[in-house]
Image (spheres, rainbow, N blue to C red):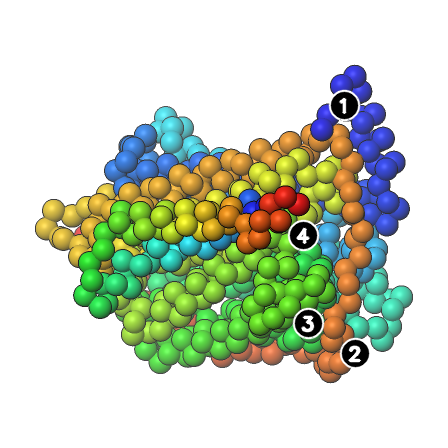
Amino acid sequence: MSRLSPAALLIVGAFMVPLFIELPVVLSFVGVELSMTASLGIGVVAFTLVLIWSEISEKPEAADA
Amino acid sequence: MSTPGETAGETVESAREMLPDNSFLIQYPHVSRVVRSLFLTAFVAFGIGAFMGVLQALHRTGIARIVASSDYYTLLTLHGVLLVIVFTIFFLAGVFTWANTRSLDRPPVSKRFTWFWVVTMSVGSAMAGIAILAGLIPSIGMSADVLFTFYAPLQAHPLFYIGLAVFIIGTWLAGIDWFRQYLAWRGENTGERIPLQSFMVLTTMLMWFIATMGVAVEVVVFLIPWSLGIVPAPNPLLTRTLFWFFGHPVVYFWLMPAYLLWYTVLPKIAGGRLFSDPLARVVFVLFLLLSTPVGIHHQYVDPGIAEGFKFIAMTNTMFLLLPSLLTAFTVVASIEHGARQRGGTGYFGWLKALPWRDPAFTGMTLAGLMFAAGGFSGMINAGMNINYLVHNTIWVPGHFHLTVGTAVALTFMAASYWLVPRITGRELYSRPIGLFQVVLWFVGMVFMSAAMHRGGLAGIPRRTAEPQYPQVTFETVAGSVGSLRLQLAFGGVLLFVSALLFLVNVGLTAMNNEPARGLDSALPPALSGPEQSPTVLDNLKLWALIAVVLVILAYSLPLYSIVQGAGLYPPGQEATPAVLAPLLEVIA
């Protein structure tokens, strides 16, 4: 059983978009240069990790339910 | 879904028979027809306006240039007028008609009068739209490429100005209709508190009556006679000031219906109740008082207005943050109450209990979130000193695409998923498509608006088809101008796809023969009801009078000073019904 429903994944993904769009701007204030492509790439990886976490059940019996 | 073998009329009747007696459509079939008509016009305008938007996003970023740069301004005018005049105001007229009828529990006084203002608004919109569209066909000899900010010295064809005047008159008649409906209710309910939704409609319309005085004088006294060749070119600063007299409060005319939906519908969808009815009334009274005497904050760089008047406008504008912050508190508290009623617990755990699968809830919530971001960038615009950094840059469209383009437009789209079944009796065609659509709008706007804000900080100008200058290099905070352009265009395309999905979903809903479910039109009472607020809040005459006095204080001296300085028709100004020639002549 998934931890997050497809709708919840959609919402979580949506909330991640502004974070990774603004990440290069925030980092530029501390002198770190990060391209938009790299930032969005990190965002895709982060979302993939959330997706994997969501699909791996907490308890084995939950998957059988 | 449609049932084969049945005629459309039979299926509609059979679907209505399955609706509960207390559904709005059964109680007020005629009012539902009026609202459907208003929504249809709003959605047609939204579709055309959205198409113009994506053309502009692709054009000015150099991704795809489908029209000539000289026609860009026609598209820009059409985009602005159709989306922020026609889409928003027709939709809010539908919402107000529904809300006033539902909360007063009675239909408008006269069907004929109601249809009269609907037709008046429609005719005015058509006249203005035709005048703009004609600009794409030079042989017609008509154009109105003056953008949404229609002040001198840019001049449009008289049909455009007359259409706008007719449209504004239509909105006044709509307001009169809602007041007549209220007065009929008041006659039978002496001493009762005004129902909340009706209170919101009436305070909004009082604000609108005051705010449109400026644009009425601008259009009727100056622009129409000028465009007909009866009088010479008017004082540009005067027409600008009269425009912004209306041009800022119109923002609240778009926003207050969204607030109505956030205060009254969103808590119901979340499974809870409005946190405080008195706070909601205070917020709407504050908007009535403070929306209009602030327009000069759009003119911080205008040389003909003394700095002191601009400072007063800035101060009034900062006071406007108060009702928005009150709204953020009240709406979030109401949503949290709903989540806890649904079993949510903990400091933040209640967020998981909210109905995120419902496109109406998710869309309105995302719209509210984006409005917070728009509020922050608005504070930059409103500050006299820091405004100089972003004035007339693409930062400004970035800001208002968060406010009217998301807080208002996304709320209206999300509310449509809740409201259209209630006025058609038909089940929403697809909730998953609706959910995907509102999220896609949010994501698209994040891409586009962030690029616009950052481009503005780099000094990239707004309102131009050619934002490239050989002698100027724009320096961005992070990334390159090229990456900002890509980001802007990508966001624009996502927004257009989202708009198409919305129109398809609503269109298929209108043709869906499956009867809608759960159409109870009652809204739950507030946790803190109107009996806990002073009755003076319902004294509309008092608030309207104070609002007029504030407007007189804010505008009388600046307007007197402008007229004393350069007169009504300064010598040496000429214009012809052309696109850019008047501006170039004045600059020269």
Q: Nearer the viewer, residue B188 or B555?
A: B188
Name the residue type under label 3. Phe
Query: Where B342 sits versus B511, above or below?
Result: below
- The amino acid at mark 1 is Thr
Rounded to the nearest angstrom, the CA distance separating label 1 from label 4 is: 30 Å
SS type, badge 4: helix
Output the chain of dot 2: B
Q: Position of residue B13 (x, y in %)?
A: 84, 31
Q: Which mark is residue B95?
A: 4
In screen coordinates, is B86 left or right of B280? Answer: left
**Residue at (53%, 73%) from the top-left corner?**
B325
Amino acid marked by disc 4 = Val
Q: Chain of mark 1?
A: B
Q: Quadrant of residue B535?
A: bottom right
Residue beneath the point at 75% across and 30% down: B513
Q: Residue at x 51, y 48 (%)?
A: A56
**Residue ID for mark 3:** B275
Q: Which label sits in the foreground, 4 or 2?
A: 2
Residue B3 circle label: 1
Instruction: Give the foreground label among 2 and 1.
Output: 1
Mark 2 to mark 1 CA distance (whole Å): 49 Å
- Compute the Cα span from label 2 to label 3: 14 Å
Q: To which quarter of the image does residue A34 belong?
A: bottom left
Q: Is residue B25 above or below residue B177?
A: above
x and y, in percent, of residue B129 in the image: 49, 38
SS label for mark 3? loop
**Tag 2 and tag 3, C-beta contact below 8 Å:** no
**Is residue B180 something that shows in the picture?**
no
Same chain for mark 3 and mark 4? The answer is yes
